[in-house]
Amino acid sequence: MLPTPSLESIGDIRLFPATPEWHESVMIAIDESQPGVRHALPWFEWDLTMPPQILEYLEEVEQMGKGGLSHHWVVKEGEHFVGLIALDHTPHLVVGHWNLGYWIRSSCQGRRLASYSIDAVLGWIGRSGGGPTAVEMRVDPTNEAGVATAISTSRRWRGHRFERGDVEVEVDGQFILHHCWLIPRLPLEESS
């Protein structure tokens, strides 16, 4: 698999490989986005100090991205950090090859930035994934914006709600059922 590249989306939205250089921007956005960000970062241990965990995350995903093992991007609109998006292999995968996760900071939500970023990522993995690939998205059903994004992504990319893929995810010490959507085959075959 290829290393994580920079990607262009629509307008002035750009995706850059997540690296430690983004540490301060990520920290500011997480602080701004409390408490909703807790569902976007289920791996985070909220009772521990935040800066070292975020730095460790960025160092780890930078190395995994260089090896093509997972792909994490920071999302920028112009010069502003607006969120994170990632493709990972996780133990929760049911039929997909990748799990797609996304988070847009509170002050930037409601402008389709997640959708535009998702389209850039799915287009890239469809072109460079080494053959047909499937992508799963899991969302807490109480996260209305996340659910709306998953539904609209499924419509654009010929996916569907995949109930067999629903799993409980530990978030802040509690197990919460997450609904799954599946994009079953990338790249999309052209319609005749």
Image (spheres, rainbow, N blue to C red):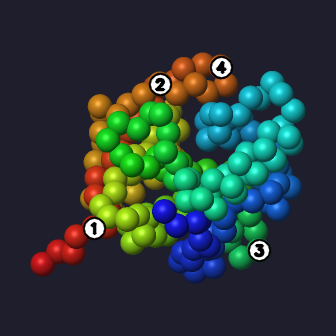
Q: Position of residue 180 (x, y in %)?
A: 38, 39
* Residue at 65%, 39% in the rendered image: 41
Observer-nearest residue: 33 or 93? 93
Per the model, the C-alpha gap separating discs 1 and 2 is: 30 Å
Q: What secondary structure is found at the residue carrying circle 1?
A: loop
Q: What secondary structure is found at the residue carrying circle 4?
A: loop
Per the model, the C-alpha gap separating discs 2 and 3 is: 36 Å
Q: In this view, does 82 lie above or below 178?
A: below
The answer to which quarter of the image holds residue 132 is bottom left
Per the model, the C-alpha gap separating discs 4 and 2 is: 12 Å
Q: Give the numbered dot on residue 173.
A: 4
Tell me which numbered mark, 3 or 1, is placed earlier along the sequence.
Answer: 3
Q: What secondary structure is found at the residue carrying circle 2?
A: strand
Question: Residue 47 vs residue 148: left or right?
Answer: right
Q: In this view, does 168 lie above or below 5?
A: above
Q: How many marks?
A: 4
Tell me which numbered mark, 1 or 4, is placed earlier along the sequence.
Answer: 4
The type of residue carrying mark 1 is Leu
The answer to which quarter of the image holds residue 35 is top right
Q: What secondary structure is found at the residue carrying circle 3?
A: loop
List the residue tagged with mark 1. 188
List the residue tagged with mark 2. 168
The type of residue carrying mark 3 is Glu
Per the model, the C-alpha gap separating discs 3 and 1 is: 32 Å
Per the model, the C-alpha gap separating discs 4 and 3 is: 35 Å
- Disc 4 or disc 3, which is closer to the eye? 4
